[in-house]
Image: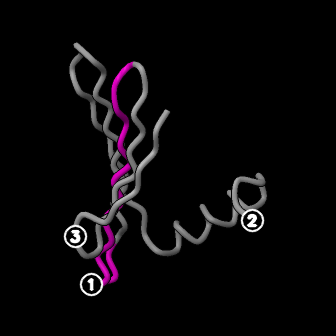
Amino acid sequence: MKTTFHEVELGKAVIQNATDLGTEQLVVTLHPENKAAIQIQIRQDTNGGTPTSSSIAINPHGLEQLVRWLREEGALS
């Protein structure tokens, strides 16, 4: 699996995994101008299949709780 990371525009970044089955993307969009929610979108495109996409939005307080939980679970250091 090959993973790439790139910033596509100010406030938006993409992490992409290329697998034998297709590609997966994690797209993170920040909205610092109004301190609004952070948008996180997951896109999957399998070879020969229909692309799927799902997204969530999280506010700064929720993000703080998520990071705390990830640290407790050992996913972040």
Amino acid at the residue labelled 2: Ser
Real-space Cα separation, disc 2 to disc 3, in angstroms? 27 Å
Q: Earlier in the sequence, mark 1 or mark 3?
A: 3
* Residue at 31% over, 82% down: 32
Label disc, if present, on residue 9 of the rendered structure: 3
Mark sitting earlier along the chain (1/2): 1
Q: Quadrant of the C terminus?
A: bottom right
Where is residue 11 drawn, in percent x and y? 29, 73
Toward which corner of the image does residue 35 lie, by quadrant? bottom left
Q: Residue at x 21, y 20 (%)?
A: 50
Query: How far across and how far down the image is residue 18, in percent?
Result: 39, 34
Residue contact between numbered discs 2 and 3, judged by CB atoms under 8 Å: no
User: Looking at the image, is 41 positioned above or below residue 71?
Assistant: above
Residue type at mark 3? Glu
Q: Residues within 10 Å of mark 1 (few under 14, many from 20)?
A: few
Q: Which residues are magenta?
A: 21-36
Q: Which residue is mark 2?
A: 77
* Residue 23 is a magenta residue: yes
* Alpha carbons under labels 1 and 3: distance apart: 17 Å
